[in-house]
Image (cartoon, rainbow, N blue to C red):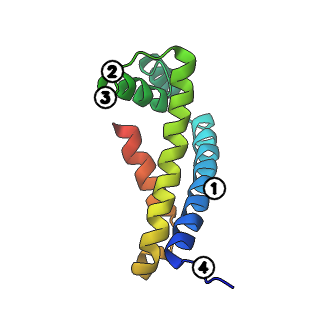
Amino acid sequence: MRKSNPFLRRVTYGMIGGVVGTMAMEQIASVMYRFEKAEKRQQEEAIRKESPYDTMARRIATGVLHVQLGDEDVVIFGQILHWGYGIAWGAVYGLVARAFPRFAEPRGCPLGWHSRSSAMKR
């Protein structure tokens, strides 16, 4: 019987945690958005013409990859970036948690919230 690779196991569990965390963050953000004051929500919607992930996808496609994407492709690429970002941070957490046990005590929630908040500010 083969022994499992602890590095691979930690990364895999971290990535699964990234999926779960991304799902949870979407739900939390949705609930928070519903309780936001109507005036603030309208102001935000007037400024933001598309989701932040779609904006990021469009900027990466044009600025880095030098391609023009249609609206449907932007949405798909935006979702790939959104989920990829969450999964990647989950993998990082899976690696770091064992090396820094105090960091792991809150089970990744502060890391997920911080990484999402910093991404949304860009």
Q: CA distance from mark 3 to mark 2?
A: 6 Å
Residue occupying image coordinates x 45% and y 47%: 116
Q: CA distance from mark 4 to mark 1?
A: 23 Å
According to the picture, the residue beneath numbered tag 2 turns out to be: 66
Mark 3 or mark 1: name the one nearer the start of the chain. 1
| Mark 2 Cα shell of 10 Å, populated few (<14), some (14-19), many (≥20) | few
According to the picture, the residue beneath numbered tag 3 turns out to be: 64
Mark 4 residue type:
Ser
State the quadrant of the N terminus. Answer: bottom right
Front residue of 25 and 14 = 14
Residue farthest along the right direction in this orientation: 1
According to the picture, the residue beneath numbered tag 4 turns out to be: 4
Position of 7 relative to 61 (above/below): below
Mark 2 residue type:
His
Q: Does dot 3 land on a helix, a strand or a loop?
A: helix
Q: Does dot 4 land on a helix, a strand or a loop?
A: loop
Residue occupying image coordinates x 36% and y 29%: 60
Mark 4 or mark 2: name the one nearer the start of the chain. 4
Looking at the rendered structure, which numbered label has been put on residue 20? Answer: 1
Q: CA distance from mark 3 to mark 1?
A: 29 Å
Tell me if label 3 and label 2 are in contact, CB under 8 Å: yes
Position of 8 relative to 4 (above/below): above
Mark 4 or mark 1: name the one nearer the start of the chain. 4
Position of 112 relative to 26 (above/below): below
